[in-house]
């Protein structure tokens, strides 16, 4: 006969997998007296404690607060970059000088490069707004889409640097370009592993899944 909860936990199978969807009712688990918990079988006790632990983690807290701040700031930062980089180009007459074949400052295909950059950055603005929706709705697609955003941003910066070097005959990776690459690279090293392995991420971003499975558990011994 078991005399306390600890003795039961020692005999619980090592692996219990729970399909989590709605765990709002688990608050009461922490309020149960030891005598009531001790009446549970080892598997039932492990099930209850497992779900309660996941219930504690579920939500936009912990390190996800930093992820959320970055997600909210990103579209505004991109809009500032677009406005400060390209608006002066059209206002001060530089566009005409650099795209007119009759001009001494003419660069062949310069207009193509600029248009690609504007379209690319505008696409990232829309993508970042979509990420805001995914994040605050706790959509199950958020972790994958956030990783796609980071990787796509790195690829775009590399491709743009190479294209610019070919068209404008300048160094592909100057100090400004390297700085632009380092920022998303650091984000990739920090947040991609976190989004892939974090328990909080796994139990928080579960909304809008197609064909949700009913709450239950399976035990492997």
Image (cartoon, rainbow, N blue to C red):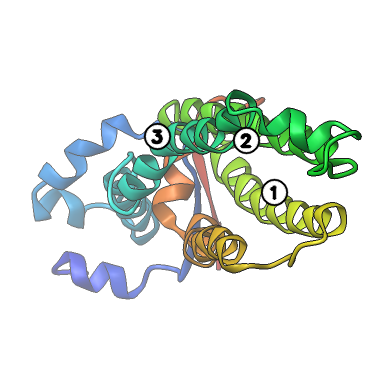
Foreground pick, 8 / 184: 184
Residue 47 in picture, x, y percent from top left: 38, 52
> Who's the residue at 57% across and 44% down the image?
146
Name the quadrant of the C terminus: bottom right
Foreground pick, 161 / 88: 88
> Who's the residue at 45% across and 69% down the image?
13
* Viewer can see residue 213: no
> How many neighbours does mark 2 have within 10 angstroms: few (below 14), some (14-19), or many (20 or more)?
many
Residue 103 in picture, x, y percent from top left: 83, 36
How far is disc 1 from disc 3 in space, using C-alphas? 18 Å
Residue under label 3 = 72
Foreground pick, 123 / 37: 123
How far is disc 2 from disc 1 in space, using C-alphas? 9 Å
How far is disc 2 from disc 3 in space, using C-alphas? 13 Å
Instruction: Assign a secondary structure to mark 3.
Output: helix
Residue under label 2 = 124
Q: Earlier in the sequence, mark 2 or mark 3?
A: 3
Q: Earlier in the sequence, mark 2 or mark 1?
A: 2
Residue 189 in picture, x, y percent from top left: 53, 67
> Who's the residue at 27% across and 68% down the image?
8
Instruction: Assign a secondary structure to mark 1.
Output: helix
Q: Earlier in the sequence, mark 1 or mark 3?
A: 3
CB within 8 Å, label 1 to label 3: no
Name the quadrant of the N terminus: bottom left
Residue 18 in picture, x, y percent from top left: 49, 48
- Name the disc covering residue 76, or none: none
Instruction: Assign a secondary structure to mark 2.
Output: helix
Residue under label 1 = 152
CB within 8 Å, label 2 to label 1: yes
Q: Is residue 91 above or below residue 156?
A: above
């Amino acid at each position: 006969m078991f005399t306390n909860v600890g003795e039961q936990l020692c005999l619980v199978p090592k692996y219990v997998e729970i399909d989590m969807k709605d765990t709002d009712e688990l608050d009461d688990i922490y309020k149960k007296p030891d005598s009531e918990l001790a009446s549970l079988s080892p598997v039932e006790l492990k099930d209850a404690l497992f779900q309660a632990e996941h219930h504690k983690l579920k939500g936009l807290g912990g390190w996800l607060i930093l992820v959320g701040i970055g997600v909210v700031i990103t579209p505004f930062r991109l809009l500032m970059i677009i406005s400060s980089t390209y608006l002066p180009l059209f206002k001060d007459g530089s566009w005409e000088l650099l795209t007119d074949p009759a001009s001494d400052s003419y660069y062949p295909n310069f207009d193509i490069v600029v248009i690609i950059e504007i379209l690319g950055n505008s696409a990232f603005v829309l993508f970042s707004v979509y990420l805001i929706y995914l994040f605050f709705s706790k959509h199950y697609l958020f972790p994958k889409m956030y990783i796609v955003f980071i990787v796509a941003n790195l690829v775009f910066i590399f491709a743009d640097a190479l294209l610019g070097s070919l068209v404008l005959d300048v160094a592909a990776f100057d100090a400004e370009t390297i700085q632009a690459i380092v920022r998303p690279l650091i984000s990739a090293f920090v947040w991609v592993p976190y989004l892939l392995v974090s328990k909080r991420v796994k139990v928080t971003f579960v909304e809008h899944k197609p064909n949700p499975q009913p709450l239950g558990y399976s035990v492997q011994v």
